[in-house]
């Protein structure tokens, strides 16, 4: 068996073992929940795969492999297990180890604390994703437009220095003022999301200007992809507790889903899908903007997960159809 085939079969075999373990030790209902969690992760993160592919194609094959190996460990244990614990600990001013213990042995109470932290989670994730979308659309060098009546006009504003950060800051301040009971947590978390995106973009641009910084550049892009994955996954982590309070089950289900999303990302890169389907990246960024709006709207009203997933699917499906029409 060659090495490439082995690397393809090993994760599938591991996923099969995990599903078998869940079914045998936790029962058939838990197995069904795990499958639903995989579907939830893939549905909410399909647009993430397209955006990741746009970044990943600029990375060397070595860093692309690391995105699937090291990156999946970060995605499973860091983003979907440790990050929510740290957010809850920071929101509740509690010991992270105590929160981790609670997640394992008192998941109902942990789910309650995670729900209480949703203002910080939604503000951070929503504003980070707003910056991702704004960075794509407010680009004066962007010549190909899908929804031309909007994209063409918006791209011209890209010559205004820091237009994305200015608009995003105005948005988060307005949202914070509209929710006075949670003004501090919304404002601080949202500004952290904006600042983190701006800082990572500055580092990436600086490294691009230095041809000797290929290793560091690959590392920064790798870090950026994982932060982007974290912003996408926060919504699915919260939604997962509507299906189960078993933290192990959630991590396994979302982790397997995250692996398939990353495999899809590499497929898009290696098969040149973004070059053939010329509007698919546009659709993904519209989907990101839709997800960001849904997360920020979640600060005021309950936005059902199916609606969030449908927003991304609708934009990507329309972009796919437009791309196929353009090919013909």
Image: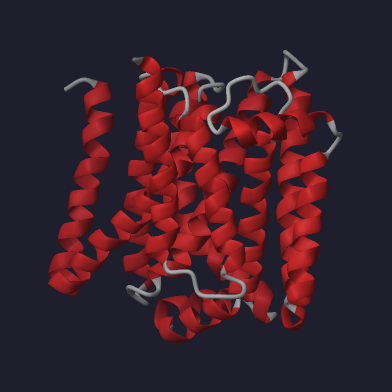
Q: Is residue 11 above or below residue 278?
A: below
Q: Is residue 78 above or below residue 285?
A: below
Q: Residue 191 occupies which quadrant of the picture?
A: bottom right
Name which residue lies at 64% across and 42% down.
Answer: 132
Percent across and percent down for residue 304 are 43, 69
Q: 83 and 238: which one is in front?
A: 238
> Is 258 on the left or on the right of 28, as rendered?
right
Q: 153 and 68: which one is in front?
A: 153
Q: 312 and 92: which one is in front?
A: 312
Percent across and percent down for residue 209 are 77, 18
Name which residue lies at 85% across and 33% down.
Answer: 160
Percent across and percent down for residue 130 are 65, 49
Q: Is residue 68 above or below residue 165?
A: above
Q: 210 and 158: which one is in front?
A: 158
Q: Residue 91 occupies which quadrant of the picture?
A: bottom right
Question: In the rendered view of the protein, which quadrant contains the N terminus?
Answer: top left
Q: Is residue 114 above or below residue 6?
A: below
**What colour scheme does the image use?**
secondary structure
Q: Is residue 52 visible?
A: no
> Is 125 on the left or on the right of 112, as rendered?
right
């Amino acid at each position: 068996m060659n090495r490439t085939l082995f690397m393809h079969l090993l994760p599938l075999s591991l996923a099969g073992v995990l599903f078998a373990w869940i079914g045998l030790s936790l029962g058939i209902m838990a197995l069904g929940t795990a499958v639903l969690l995989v579907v939830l992760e893939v549905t909410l993160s399909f647009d993430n795969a397209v955006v990741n592919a746009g970044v990943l194609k600029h990375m060397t094959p070595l860093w692309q492999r690391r995105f699937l190996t090291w990156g999946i460990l970060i995605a499973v244990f860091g983003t979907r297990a440790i990050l929510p614990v740290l957010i809850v600990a920071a929101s509740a001013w509690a010991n992270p180890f105590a929160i981790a213990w609670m997640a394992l042995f008192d998941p109902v109470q942990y789910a309650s604390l995670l729900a209480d932290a949703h203002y910080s989670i939604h503000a951070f994730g929503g504003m980070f994703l707003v910056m991702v979308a704004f960075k794509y659309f407010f680009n004066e060098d962007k010549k190909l437009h899908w929804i031309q009546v909007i994209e063409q006009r918006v791209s011209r504003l890209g010559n205004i220095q820091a237009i994305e950060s200015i608009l995003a800051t105005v948005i988060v301040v307005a949202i914070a003022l509209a929710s006075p009971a949670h003004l501090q947590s919304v404002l601080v978390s949202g500004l952290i999301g904006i600042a983190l995106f701006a800082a990572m973009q500055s580092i990436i641009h600086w490294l691009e200007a230095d041809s000797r910084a290929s290793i560091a550049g690959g590392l920064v892009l790798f870090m950026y992809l994982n932060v982007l994955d974290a912003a996408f996954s926060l919504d699915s982590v919260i939604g997962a507790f509507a299906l189960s309070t078993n933290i192990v089950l959630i991590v396994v289900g979302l982790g397997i889903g995250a692996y398939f999303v990353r495999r899809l990302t590499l497929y898009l890169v290696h098969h040149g899908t973004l070059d053939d389907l010329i509007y698919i990246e546009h659709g993904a960024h519209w989907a990101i903007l839709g997800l960001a709006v849904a997360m920020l709207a979640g600060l005021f009203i309950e936005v059902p997960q199916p609606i969030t997933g449908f927003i991304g699917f609708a934009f990507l499906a329309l972009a796919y159809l437009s791309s196929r029409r353009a090919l013909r």
